[in-house]
Amino acid sequence: MLEEFNDTTPLEDRENIIECKDLNKWFGDLHVLKNVHLNVKKGEVLVVLGPSGSGKSTFIRTLNALEEIQKGTITIDGTTLTNDLSDIETIRKETGMVFQQFNLFPHMTILKNIMLAPIWVRKWPKDKVEKIALELLDRVGIPEQANKYPGQLSGGQQQRVAIARALAMQPKIMLFDEPTSALDPEMIKEVLDVMKELAKTGMTMVVVTHEMNFAREVADRIVLFDYGEIIESGTPEEMFDNPQHERTKLFLSQIL
Amino acid sequence: MNREQVETNLPILPPPKEKVTFFQWLKDNLFSSWYNTLFTIALSILLFSIIKGTLTWIFIDADWSIVTSNFKILMSGQYPAVQLWRVWLCIVLLASLLGFSSGIWNGTITHLSIFLGSLLFISGILPFVSLETRIWTFIGLAILIVGHFIGKKIPIKKTILIGWFLLFPIAIFFINGFGVLPKVGTNLWGGFLLTILLATVAIVCSFPIGVLLALGRRSKLPTIKYFCIFYIEFIRGIPLITILFVSSIMLPLFLGQGVELNNILRAMIGLTLFNAAYLAENVRGGLQAIPRGQYEASHALGLSSPLMTCFIILPQALRSVIPAMVGQFIAIFKDTTLVTIIGIIDILGMAKNVAQNPQFLGQQMEVFLFVAVVFFLFCYALSYTSRRIEKSLGVGER
Amino acid sequence: MNTTTPFWRDKRIKPILLQLLFVIIIGIAMFYFINNALTGLKRMGLSLSYSFLNSTASFDISGDKLIEYSATDKYSRAILVGFLNTLRVAILGIIFATIIGVILGIARLSNNWLARNTSKVFVEIFRNTPLLVQMIIWYSAVFLTLPLIGDNYNFANAIFLSNRGIAIPWFKPIDITWIWLSFIVLGIIGAVFTWKWKIKQQVETGKRKYPSIWVFGTLLLSIIFPFVVTQSGPFTLSIPEINPNGRSFVGGFVISPSFGAVLLALVMYTSAFIAEIVRSGIMGVNKGQVEAAQSLGLKSSTMLRLVIFPQAYRIMIPPMTSQYLNLTKNSSLAVAVGYPELVSVGNTILNQSGRAIQMITIMIICYLTFSLITSLLMNIFNKYTQLVER
């Protein structure tokens, strides 16, 4: 049902699915993204690290057109983001997003939450969507909660539903904006496990997080943001064991 | 994978200037789609005819003599003209307090003093007011401005705060006289002066009752709790006019023969009892918003319940409900007009009286519109203030 | 630890003592007031009985009456007339205020600058002036300044504006009206079901089924069909005319000046408050909800319908309830313009019979009943729609 993208070609030979050129963004006079240049390959798991206020959350939100950029271009799966609403729609269809605060719709059951977008956006028939939804709930480990409301679930369960909701659209890319930051420590693992499983299927993922172990274990590549710019980028081994930049060293020493 | 060479320490650049031309603005805000365009055109035509009609009426058709020749009684009713200086003195006192406060604290209060200042200025230059009025308004204005600049230099916060607390009793003393000055009884109060006094008395007197009711409603003692719930819900369930009937007709009956209260005092009691119930609900909202931790911390510090209520809980609760209480003040200020129905001559009652004068036949619209504008100015200024306070308290922000 | 604590420090006894003290104080105060009232009443030779309700009212109620009433009827019937008039103005007021308020509230969030600001100015003007002043303006400066009935303004001899009221053409039922009515009701029910059915089909198959066209078709059918069957329109129009005596209208629907003023003032005033409630309700939906809906690719109309509104109206229910209650209570201001509602009629009886305590008690009971019923209904509605929490 859910296609797995397990591709055997090595990462560097694959094509870019996300291309960001020269991203610049300001909040008023505050320069929050400075000339961000970043490409993500198909099936790559990219982890974005950085101190709070470094612009990493803003960056991931621009990829889903939740924040406007004032300069630069974003191309996702061949579609370039413009002011054209249909481009924005296309891009949002192909990217799933998971938020720090879950943002489940509190007035709908879990099942309805998941089925909403495939029905109204993809316009798939209901029985097909329901099947997908139940399968996804099974996959994220909470099949028995389908008819409950978000308010009745724990934080960890809600976040897993949020992942399932994004996956139900069968996106090509998944964006995670600090998915575990609002969770109690004992619930973080259950969400990270789901994400690890997802990474194994070959899904393209961009993850903003503070979970260093997750980054080391799962990431194909890590970039470090500070003051709105990318300071350093590399594989987990390179970044953790042999950081080049002073600010990377400082950041890692504070967090580890 | 090769490590990318990344350029760092990029300069912080100013945001690109977005030039919004006039036409672009028009397109975005008025003509963004065909139905928006259609809507804009239809609404413009409608608004144009309304505004044109209103302006022609105000400046050409209307006869404002009913307002200009009755200005004094509309504003102060039967208050003796020789004693009017006492009212002016209170206004000047208010102006000085506002002036000083705006100098000291700046912020929202400055907007209020600008409001009072412009009100004084406008009433001072109206063509039909007496010379005495002109002199007093400009004294008030001068003191307001001087106070502002002195307040900026010398922050005498405590004196001013005490001044605000004493303003109400001092004002009542001057306006009434109580025999020290020639007594001007409540039966002579009227017009807009009475409207303001009714509203102020109601809010000031109902404040302690409201706080007690709110505390009582949250009390653990069932008799007190249910008494307060009953009172609050009962009063909130019936219209103000019935309460005014009760106070004007039944109060003398309840108090027995020994106590004589005139109509205005009875209305004040009615308004106070009414307002207390609404105020109690506002205060209760503030009490409920206080986190449990505050109670627990106070108990852990060994504060007794009354001490905790006075020093920890109430100050926080009252602070957070300031906007709601200003809203309640606006409501009771508007509601004071109901006293006309029980025969008290406030500004609306006075307007009704002069509209019936054969000399001013057919000028009802002018005089009632004048009353509406007076209320609008005050209510708008207050609601603007309350919104600003709300913002500065960070209430209602998400 | 066998030393006896003094009883006033005992954790269990102190609250009881406090409450006892409270009850005694309240009791003494009540006794004092009631005793005064009773002696006062005795002195004036009045009783507390309600038997006067059965005596003849001997005053007429001019204008708006929903039931037959004349001066020879009993007081109780006069009160019923007032009660029904209050209900009438309150129910109509709630309906119109809600419609206008919702439109204004949505206009305040519109991306059209003109709509946004017009709505804002309207709201500020109407909620910052006293309702009573507005009502008196409508009554004495608008409706009563219309020309005498003899030289009324009229449009095509069908709509009359005069100081005796506004007369407009109205539908007059004929014997086949019920056929039309039943077809139209059936049509509406049918349309609702067609809509649901088509939406369901669309959801199930994922193909477009054009539900709005189907609904339109159903409604059209429900109009064509009775026309074909009965070969006539649903009703005749009753066009108002001036009574030969030249003092009133016959036929049509006449809005009396006092009713018009009360309704208009209540609707304008309350809709300004409702507009603010609607606006803050929609704004009050968490921003994250919008972002989540957007990131799933929902179109803004779908998002409004399925995500924003269902959450916004939950925020709006409690303040709306209190606005509805306020409107009902505020209808009592109609006494100032002589619309014969509960307080107005009650006040007349009070002045005429001197039965102040009884009349005020009756008014209070009526309003408390309105309040209780409204709160009860809205509470049920609220419970029914509340979000499920842990």
Image (cartoon, rainbow, N blue to C red):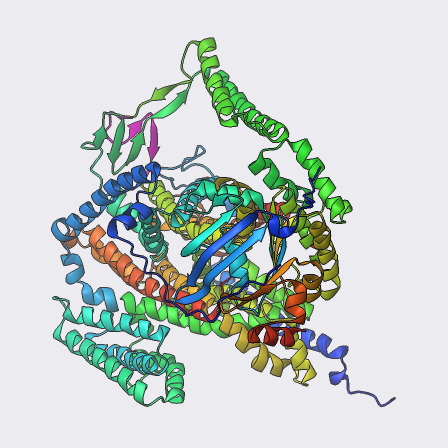
Q: Which x, y percent locates residue B180?
A: 30, 87
Residue B218 image point, x, y percent:
63, 69
Image: B180 above or below A150: below
Q: Quadrant of the N terminus of chain A?
A: top right
Would residue B275 be visible to someone looking at this image? yes
Left or right of residue C42, residue A82 in this image: left
From what the image shows, is residue C149 above or below residue C54? above
**How many badges with numbers are in the image?**
0
Quadrant of the image for the C terminus of chain A?
bottom right
Relative horizontal placement of residue C320, taking residue B158 as reference (left or right): right
Residues A55 and A204: in front is A204
Residue at point 35%, 78% (across, down): B106
Q: Is residue C365 magenta?
A: no
Q: Position of residue B216 (x, y in %)?
A: 61, 70
Q: Could one spot residue A174 in this view of the protein?
A: no
Judge whether residue C253 is colored magenta. Answer: yes
Along the line of sight, the residue nearer the viewer: B219 or B42: B42
Vertically, is C322 above or below B180? above
Residue B48, given in percent of the width and then of the height, sits at 22, 44
Q: Quadrant of residue B352?
A: bottom left
Q: Nearer the viewer, residue A126 or A173?
A: A173
Q: Is residue C22 left or right of residue B116?
A: right
- In the shown orientation, is residue B187 left or right of residue B158? left
Span colored in magenta: C241-256
Where on the picture, by quarter, is residue C144? top left
